[in-house]
Amino acid sequence: MKQRILSAALAAAFFSAPAAALAQDTDLAKRVEQLAAELEKVKAELAAQRGQAAAAPAQPVQPAQPVQPAVTAPAAAATAAPASALASDTVFSGYGEVNYNHPVRNASGAQTDLRRAVIGIQHRFDEKTKVVAEFEWEHAIASASDSGESAIEQMYVEREFNNGLRGKAGLFLMPVGLLNQNHEPTAYYGVERNFVETAIIPTTWREAGIGLSGEFGDGFTWDTGLTTGFDLTKWDPASSEGRESPLGAIHQEGQLAKSRNLAVHGALNWRGVPGLLVGGSVFTGEAGHKTQDFAGNDARVTMTELHTRYTPGAWDLSALYAYGRISNTEALNATFVGNPTPVPSSFAGWYLQAAYKLWQNADYALTPFARFESFNTARTYAQVPAGLGVPTTPYERVGTVGANLMIGQGVVLKADYQKFREDKTLDRVNLGVGFAY
């Protein structure tokens, strides 16, 4: 730049007067010589600066402060895209749903509920280390006098290692079934989550502990860990909660969780064929925690399940079987005699589901579906003295037909009808709207 300015000044000095006058003006000649000397000096300084810059080590470019973009996929999964792909160290996600339920035999029982709203945050400390957290509110209002609930759905730190192994520690979702780790309203069919993965496998089942996961072979993934388990001392034989979901009534959710006895879990999945998933899991741990003067202090909870999903073309086919067992409940149930809800020794359920993407364009996708499920939260009870036990209940069988209408990539409208075989008063029409981002 200096060189160009000086050159322009020199040219101006040459052409501002006639050539004959310039030859006779000695003062002007001296000025020209002075400008030429200064020009050479500037050239020398520029050359010296270029040499110093070439010899100095390269300085890293400091990144600008990251801008937090909107995430286009739910974190559920806490499985959001890496921060490097999103050009941000911290990303936000979320999902929510509002549902309407109308019992066909009891119109006065119809209700609308903001079922849940969830905000997720994921922050990457570096390419291999991140923290994931999700905060959930249920039923619109959470207070001492309301039915709502505020909870931390998960919060853990994960580290990726060079060999593909991943380790995590904190409060995280159990790798059980098809729904527990992927339960955003855009990820499943029907207004409500299916009964088998809510009553038999408790929905959004999470434990505090450590976990390891990885891959091997041709399409195999595995997940294992050491975590907290269930607390059987929470069982209330006078309440119906245990009949609705045995494990849901005694889960600890990371809240002052009893940890005298820890639990172990393992899951294995195979995706070696495009569109096909086959897998299963097992979870086991003592639930009495050696509690003094508690009759069930040596009880053990075990949950096993098998699942598969196949998505050829426009079809989406899935099936799941789950079986749970609580051992050593005889002495405990003897103390519950006279109450309506003793502890079951086993509970189980299964479902089959088929969905077909009937119509799709750039903005919408319509997918009708049908699901049949059978489940029993009190399949068997341990032996008690004759005449003092509670009879086992029959399997409830529920058929659901409906459709999901996806709007863009993150909003879904849902409608379905559910028919109950045993308790027909539960037959209902459901409507819902949900979103995930």
Image: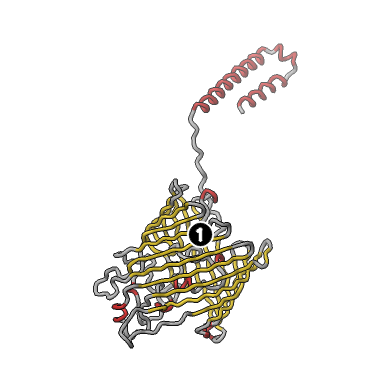
Q: Is residue 119 visible?
A: no
Q: In the rendered view, would you say 162 is above or below 192?
A: above
Q: Nearer the viewer, residue 261 or 323?
A: 323
Q: Residue 210's x, y, as percent?
A: 38, 57
Position of residue 274 measured from the top left corner of the image (x, y, whole percent): 58, 57
User: Element type at marker 1?
Assistant: loop
- Of residue 238 and residue 381, the one placed in the foreground of this image is 381
Q: Residue at x 50, y 84 (%)?
A: 423
Q: Quadrant of residue 433?
A: bottom right
Query: In this rendering, would 264 be left or right of 220?
Result: left
Q: Quadrant of the N terminus?
A: top right
Query: Viewer-proximal residue, 201 or 428?
Result: 201
Residue located farthest toward the left when viewing the structure as drawn? 293
- Residue 121 is situated, as x and y percent measured from the top left of the image, at 48, 58
Residue 235 picture location, percent across and down: 35, 76
Query: Residue at position x 46%, y 63% from top?
Result: 280
Q: Quadrant of residue 13?
A: top right
At x 50% / y 70%, what residue is drawn? 116
Query: The C terminus appears in which quarter of the rendering?
Result: bottom right
Label 1 sits on what residue type? Ala
* Residue tagged 1: 75
How did the renderer colour the structure? Answer: secondary structure
Camera-nearest residue between 45 and 247: 247
| Mark 1, other Cα within 10 Å: few <14 / some 14–19 / many ≥20 | many
**Furthest-bottom residue in view?**
387
Say left or right for 64 vs 381.
right
Q: Is residue 317 above or below residue 13?
A: below
Asked whether residue 89 is in view, the answer is yes
Determine the image quadrant of residue 229.
Answer: bottom left
